[in-house]
Image (cartoon, rainbow, N blue to C red):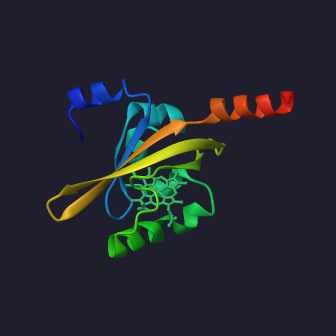
Amino acid sequence: RSGSILQSILATVPAGMVVIDEQGLITSFSATAQALFGYSETELLGQNVKILMPAPHHDRHDDYIKHYLQTGEQHIIGIGRKVEGRRKDGTIFPMQLEVGEARIGEECLFTGFIVDLTEQTRTAAEMQALQ
Ligand code: HEM
């Protein structure tokens, strides 16, 4: 569990933060991420991060991580991508995902930063409709 100072700081970051281990299991889930996905941190600790996404990536995400650990090929790390998230109530929403890697000795942890794009996407669709 992260310290309370770090937790207080993370609560001020507009992006939700999810930390996972090499198996894709959640080790930390920030307050913003909890508000965004509707899960509490306690519910998600030790759960696979794929619970936060719909198919097709839901069924492939373990392989994405495995492939990265074997080859070092980055498809999201350092690049970012717009993907779909899945909330606890089942709703799907557009989100910007940035992933970083933190090496701690032999082990590595992945940090995911998530911004909800629902508003931006709606505004863009409305602008389109007006043209
Ligand atoms: C790779 C989807 C969340 C960590 C990927 C890839 C996709 C993806 C499409 C690349 C597959 C490829 O092109 O080969 C998603 C979706 C998410 C999500 C839809 C929605 C919740 C996360 C989070 C983390 C994470 C929160 C970390 C905390 C990784 C890692 C890789 C990866 C480590 C492999 C490295 C890389 O390709 O750069 N994910 N992901 N993902 N994802 Fe996720």
Residue 22 drawn at (x, y percent): 32, 63
Residue 70 drawn at (x, y percent): 34, 76
Considering depth in this image, is 100 or 78 the residue closer to the camera?
78
Considering depth in this image, is 48 or 96 the residue closer to the camera?
96
Q: Residue at x 41, y 66 (%)?
A: 65
Considering depth in this image, is 106 or 7 the residue closer to the camera?
106
Whether residue 55 can be seen here? yes
Picture layout, residue 93 above or below residue 107: above
Residue 28 drawn at (x, y percent): 33, 44
Whether residue 38 can be seen here? no
Q: Quadrant of the N terminus?
A: top left
Q: Quadrant of the C terminus?
A: top right
Please tell me in which quadrant of the rendered image residue 24 appears: bottom left
Horizontally, residue 81 falls left or right of residue 102, namely: right
Residue most extreme to the front: 131
Considering depth in this image, is 131 or 122 the residue closer to the camera?
131
Q: Residue at x 63, y 61 (%)?
A: 55
Picture layout, residue 106 above or below residue 31: below
Please tell me in which quadrant of the rendered image residue 124 appears: top right
Q: Residue at x 53, y 43 (%)?
A: 96
Residue 61 drawn at (x, y percent): 49, 64
Picture layout, residue 112 above or below residue 68: above
